[in-house]
Image: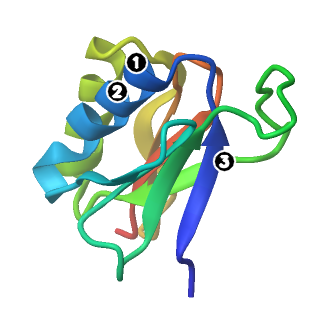
């Protein structure tokens, strides 16, 4: 259903490194690099995250209530993704934990540009 999600960023090289390093365990890498936009994922035919300098030339701003959620596959993997994001310069926006009993486990960070990310498992 989703082809890609785009996040506005202020530093393309930093952002490509952040997302490639964060998602390398899932086999993600830059699939397309157009200079002001880069698409990161497993392939162009699977969902991706794109980082871009805004087309209008204005500063990127994270939206209030906007979040990109990455399926982790397990609670342990969500914990690892959270820790890796923090190592890469993200800030905590909700430590890993069970959010809905016996259903949803999540961890939340803000990337270096303030975009909110979730790493989750339905368990």
Residue 28, position as x, y percentages in the image? 22, 55
- Of the residues under marks 1 and 3, which one precedes in the sequence? 1
Q: Name the residue under label 1.
A: 14
Position of the N terminus, as image quadrant, is bottom right
Q: Give the side of residue 116 with respect to residue 42, left or right.
A: right
Q: Up-down: is 83 above or below 19?
A: above
Q: Viewer-nearest of labels 2 and 1?
A: 1
**89 or 13: nearer the eye?**
13
Q: Which labelled disc corresponds to residue 67?
A: 3
Residue 119: image x %, image y %? 41, 48
Q: Residue at x 22, y 60 (%)?
A: 74
Q: Where is residue 109 in the image (x, y as percent from the top left)?
A: 51, 28
> Does the residue at mark 2 contact the one at mark 1 (Cβ under 8 Å)?
yes
Dot 3: few (<14), some (14–19), or many (≥20) neighbours within 10 Å?
Answer: some
Q: Residue at horizontal 53%, vertical 76%?
A: 3
Residue that appears at 76% across and 26% down: 60
Foreground label between 2 and 3: 2
Q: How far is the residue under mark 2 from the one under mark 1?
A: 6 Å
């Amino acid at each position: 259903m989703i082809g890609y999600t785009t996040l506005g960023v202020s530093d393309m090289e930093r952002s490509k490194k952040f997302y490639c390093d964060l998602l390398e365990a899932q086999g993600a890498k830059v699939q397309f690099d157009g200079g002001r936009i880069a698409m990161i994922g497993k392939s162009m035919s699977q969902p991706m995250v794109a980082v871009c300098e805004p087309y209008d030339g204005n500063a990127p701003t994270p939206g209030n209530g906007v979040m990109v959620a990455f399926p982790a596959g397990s609670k342990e993997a969500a914990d690892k993704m959270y820790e890796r994001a923090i190592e890469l310069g993200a800030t905590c926006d909700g430590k890993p934990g069970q959010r809905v009993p016996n259903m949803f486990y999540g961890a939340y960070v803000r990337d270096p540009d303030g975009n909110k990310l979730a790493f989750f498992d339905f368990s």
